[in-house]
Amino acid sequence: MKIFEAYISPISRKFIEQKLTANLSLSDANILFHSVSGIASFFETATDLEELKEKLLSTSNILKEPDRTEYGDFQTNSHLAITVAKYLSKKGNEPDVVIEPTCGKGNFIVAALKTFKTLKKVYGIEIYRPYVWETKFSILDFYIENPSTNKPIILISHYNVFDFDFKAIASEVSGQNILVIGNPPWVTNSMLGGLNSSNLPAKSNFKKHNGLDSITGKGNFDIAEYITMIMLETFQNQNGNIALLVKNSVIKNIIFDQKKNKYKIGNIEKHCIDSKKEFNVSVDAALFLGQLNASPSFKCNEFDFYKNSKPLLSFGWVEEKFVSNIKTYVHSKDIDGDCPFEWRQGLKHDCSTIMEFDKVNGHYLNSLNEETELESDLVYGILKSSDLKNSIVKKSRKYTIVTQRKVGQETSYIRSAYPKTYQYLLNHQSSFDARKSSIYKGKPSFSIFGIGDYSFKPFKVVISGLYKTYHFTLVLPDKKKPLMLDDTCYMLGFDKLDYAVYTLILLNSQQTKELLQSVTFPDAKRTFTKDVLMRIDLSKLSNQLSLDKLQYEIEKLNTQYSLNASIDNWNSFIDQLRPAVSGQTTMFV
């Protein structure tokens, strides 16, 4: 049955019914339950005590458990919790104190009580009141069935983790061996904000992102990452360990930020779990382990949680470079530097139903099945990640309206120069106004983003940021009109076909593939980002390409795709790679 929306076993219910007599005071009730369960202040208030008595008399306590997965609430099952605890014990972890910052239903706490025989104190913090009660009932269950087992002092607090004073705990347990354990929410701050959740930290740019980064994605962060950082900052000087179930991206970010944070955590390990099996969700997640009060470590060894064998790989910092596979990186590190050309992202409009079209009988058809006639000047073919399967692309499936040639350009010119296009856009003004991203605030009507001189270069070398294929594509103009890319793609733009072909050959080399495999994370939302691509040093890469190999690759592309590329401009291309230059747009004019 359920009480306070929390499951209570028949054993605990029977015990409570027998012990909670009508005249039992709050003080006496807490003394009694503490003696049995170790929980200090089982009833926080007299109201809690009276409500529990009342609920036990009610027969209508069967309630459907609310679905809290949208809050990133994936409760750790008892088997996984006990497996983690036993693994930690096998590694020699015998804590005096266990701290769980988001204890949920209490499975990790019960696992700790079953596993660690020297525990003196347990702290559990949980914002969701039904889970607070379920944790207490679970602990009570355990001690009713195992009355002679060691009983540490157990404090279960109904509290928002972001408001809780963990420094007070650090002070109380100073000098003792601690274990920070748990499974913090697998959700981002923006997702919780969209759900109007109160379980959010105070509004802050806690990673100190600047300008555009802070409002276009990098300012978004994982709640579990934030909690992990709180734990590391608070307890890094305590003897003990940390063991948290988090998304893989959180572990990667923690190791990446170690370069500047230098938390006193060593022997860092990532043990990959099967989230589908454990939580029935398709999320890449792992157990993050580390030793506190240790020399800061800047790398992480990755294991299979279930096989517990040798490390699969190690990732982290190699001197000043962050890599996904330290062992394989040594073979490609020579070309890890700075790209002399600036990689750009494709255009962004956040209005695909209105701004993207199929072409049918000379007219344009949007996804609302509206057929419209538009002037051709502002209509360009646009490619998405799924269109980049071949080595060379020169036609598009989709079309888009390009309202600006640079970000922030006034769009009022469309009204007089392109009346049909203007009327179409005006008819859908509400769709543009409904765009949520703050990048459009204060911008002209029908604004787009990710647009500049580079967008109109006739020849582009492109890669999808989403797909996990280490393959670059040459995009050619369609009827002398450049093709656009959407914002899932990254590109280099060129005025000369030869330069684009040379770049394509260099980027599709085995050396480049090996570098990218060593510095990208396959479970990342975007395998390739601008930061990653800017690490490909084309100048150093060109030194590894012989003229014979270059000539062979050019002739192969010419034959297969009817190009007219030549090796004649190779030396001038090399000259462009080596000097320090101010920007790509001046480089290829």
Image: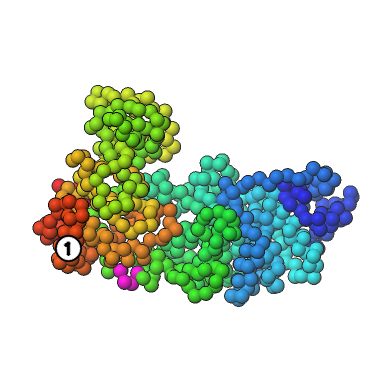
Question: Does 336 sit above or below residue 485?
Answer: below
Question: Does 48 sit above or below residue 471?
Answer: above
Of residues 70 and 587, which is closer to you in this image? 70
Crowding at dot 1, Cα within 10 Å, few <14 / some 14-19 / many 20+, comes out as: few
Q: Magenta stretch containing residue 583, yes or no?
A: no
Task: Please give the name of the residue rendered at 60% of the width and 51% of the height, measured from the top-left corner.
Answer: 73
Residue sticking out furthest to the left: 568
Task: Please give the name of the residue rendered at 26% of the width and 43% of the height, measured from the top-left corner.
Answer: 395
Report which residue position mark 1 lands on: 552
- On the image, the x and y values in percent for residue 305 come to 55, 68
Q: Does residue 8 appear to the left or right of 319 in the view shown?
A: right
Q: Magenta stretch containing residue 330, yes or no?
A: yes
- On the image, the x and y values in percent for residue 274 come to 55, 61
The reply to whether residue 338 is visible in this rendering is no
Of residues 501 and 269, which is closer to you in this image? 501
Q: Quadrant of residue 384?
A: top left
- On the image, the x and y values in percent for residue 3 come to 76, 48
Q: Does residue 560 appear to the left or right of 571 in the view shown?
A: right
Task: Please give the name of the residue rendered at 70% of the width and 67% of the height, measured from the top-left corner.
Answer: 113
Task: Please give the name of the residue rendered at 68% of the width and 52% of the height, measured from the top-left corner.
Answer: 131
Name the chief secondary structure element in magenta: loop
Which residues are the magenta region?
A: 329-333
Question: Does 315 sit above or below residue 13?
Answer: below
Helix, strand or loop for disc 1: helix
- On the image, the x and y values in percent for residue 166 come to 60, 58
Q: Quadrant of residue 517?
A: bottom left
Q: Check disc 1 and give the amino acid type.
A: Tyr
The reply to whether residue 544 is visible in this rendering is yes
**Count of residue discs:** 1
Of residues 25 and 91, which is closer to you in this image? 91
